[in-house]
Amino acid sequence: MNTAFAHPVTQGIVLATGAVLLLAALAIGAMTLLGRGTPAFRRELWLRYGSWLVLLPLMFGPVLLGRAWTIGAVTLLGLLCLGEFARATGLFREYLTTAVVALGIVAVGFAALDNWYRLFVALWPLTTVVILVATIPLDRPAGYIQRNALAIFAFMLLGVGLGHLGYMANDPGYRPLVLMLLAAVALNDVAAFTFGKLLGARLFGGRKLVPNTSPNKTVAGALGALCTTTALVAYLGSLIFAETAMAHPALLLFLGVLVSVAGQCGDLMLSSIKRDIGIKDMGAALPGHGGIMDRFNSLLLVAPAVFHLINYVVGIAEGQPTRLITG
């Protein structure tokens, strides 16, 4: 466990998160004692706070415990999100197709645990092929396009997208990087909400970003999140990637923009899905947040985007033993 906190960025993120939780408890407690806000609003704040008290240890714990824990947690997260997605879209009725997607997610997790990048990449088209042919012997062409489109969509998001976050754990310096991404996407959401509420009416006349998709999101909130997240990621990235090619200021700024934009797009993507099928949340597992997929939607796009940028510039898990299980 000593090595878990070896990097100063890891220490800083954990300490900062603890401080934010303490300040949030004091602020909500003060509101409650002073009777500020409506009872329903204060209850909503306490529900969200309670969810974060459970979520943060579950998010940070596996990363601090080690590589296998991180990959296992990401794989489990993908399966839990698949359960919500299948129930929301009706895919759960297609038992065989859903099972193939679940097996694909597990296989991607295995490839990451094995540190076998070629298999990790090959599983994307191979699983897609299996999804497409799995139900053909059932001789049931009705609904073929719909069920397979939903299945491939789910696998690419929850298996492939999230799988990149797990594969990062094969790099010796993965802890500060993964913790930075977890903290950055959370800050991205908070900054968008805060800037939208405080400055939305003053800037751009309260103009909505995409009102039909997400009525509460404003242009001011999106720009505020972009600036805040970019600054945080660029700063932390300069410490994580010191003395490497990624330490170039232009690349660090691009990394920050990428995290913020991909994070907001992931949120809007899930909003589009929910609007299309006519639901408010993907589930009710997290009081005050909705479902698990509602909380982690940003990572679906952030993880692969960041992974391939860093892998292209400096490499991920370069020089590490490969095929740890199958070799």
Image: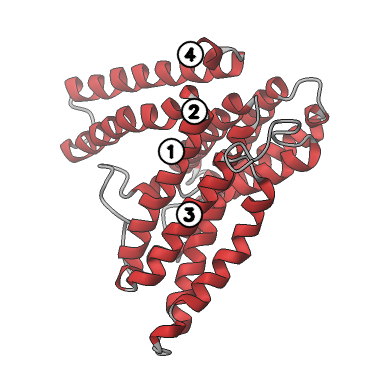
Front residue of 175 and 97: 97
CA gap, disc 2 to disc 3?
Answer: 19 Å
Figure check: 23 above or below 192: above
**The residue under label 3 is which amino acid type?**
Ile
**The residue under label 2 is which amino acid type?**
Val
Residue 10's label in the rendered image is: none
Residue 63's label in the rendered image is: 2
* Whether residue 11 is visible: no
Q: Which residue is mark 1?
A: 73
Front residue of 111 and 48: 111
Q: In the displayed image of the protein, which residue is found farthest to the top?
A: 2
To which quarter of the image does residue 255 belong? top right
Residue 105's label in the rendered image is: 3
Quick one: label 1 or label 3, which is nearer the N terminus?
Answer: 1
Contact? badges 1 and 2 (CB < 8 Å) = yes
* Whether residue 49 is visible: yes
Q: Is residue 250 left or right of residue 211?
A: right
Circle 1 crowding by C-alpha within 10 Å: few under 14, some 14–19, many from 20: some
Q: Which residue is mark 4?
A: 1
